[in-house]
Image (spheres, rainbow, N blue to C red):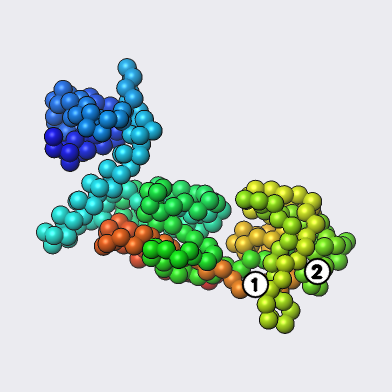
Amino acid sequence: MDRIEAMTILLRVVDKGGFSAASRDLGVPLATVSRKVNELESRLGARLLVRTTRKVALSDAGALYVASVRRILEQIDETERVAAGEFHTPRGELILTAPILFGRLHILPIVSDFLAAYPEINVRLLLSDRNLHLIDDHVDMAVRIGPLPDSGVIATRVGSMRMVACASPKLLAGRGVPKSPQDLADLPSVTFDFLSPVSAWPFRLGDGTGRMDAPIRPRLSVTTAEAAVWAAVQGVGVTRVLYYQCADAVRDGALQIVLADFELEPLPVHLLHAGRGALPSKMRVFLDFAAGRLRERLASL
């Protein structure tokens, strides 16, 4: 069995939504299309497609297999074109991930412009506040805010981001503006607890010699930064978020930053990709396209 041919046929069945459509698109008899997919499933010992009278759908095993196959075929195409020394237009599917709000505010506009510039590249933008694994989750490139793990990833730094404490002017007028992190114990707080409850926030010591954990008094705990910012605007309490998450509210006067002199060093922001061999052209052109634009956006904040 020609596995590359079978993989190509399987992808066409998935992309076209059925065997008949794939047969017409490929100019291959329907019986051949069906036989090639059956041979592939027999070789793997797994059902890849769930067939109904109206359509075909991927099984769980099929979804994982097709994602890998798509990458394999793109890499083969890339390798052949590089070996032939041909100039070619970057193409294929590019899978990106970014934090939810940051992705919506800053990555999506860049992706929109990128799609206009490279019509043969399609993008899947996975917005998640959980750090997806580049290889295990089949991600080409990721935006990371914060220290990087010591791993085999390639990182391109595009800027930095402050972590700020902020509250509504009305709350501060009634309860007083905190002069030091210890004053937070006298104020209600809104915590952004993505993984576990928070009872203290880290700050830099006033003399700059180290850091401290300031106890807080949570009144409300939420699981998204947008919810924390909204609650802070309503006067529920002080919250602590990345600056881009509250920038609009600060700019509009709905929130006021406090304890700026005690903030920790800004967190680095990187574009990451796995360090495996030559970079596919679709990733190379996105990195070139996005890095400068993202630096400008972060600098403007």
Q: Identity of the amino acid at label 2?
A: Gln
Q: Earlier in the sequence, mark 2 or mark 1?
A: 2
Q: Residues within 10 Å of mark 1 (few under 14, many from 20)?
A: some
> As drawn, is 194 to the left or to the right of 57?
right
Q: Residues within 10 Å of mark 2 (few under 14, many from 20)?
A: some
Q: Residue furthest top?
A: 53
- The percent position of residue 130, horizontal first and vertical second, equals 53, 51
Q: Quadrant of residue 233?
A: bottom right
Q: Identity of the amino acid at label 1?
A: Leu
Q: Which residue is mark 2?
A: 182
Q: Which residue is mark 1?
A: 264
Rendered residue at 69%/61% (across/down): 240
Mark 1 secondary-structure assignment: loop
- The percent position of residue 133, horizontal first and vertical second, equals 44, 52
Rendered residue at 42%/63% (across/down): 151
Q: Residue furthest right?
A: 174
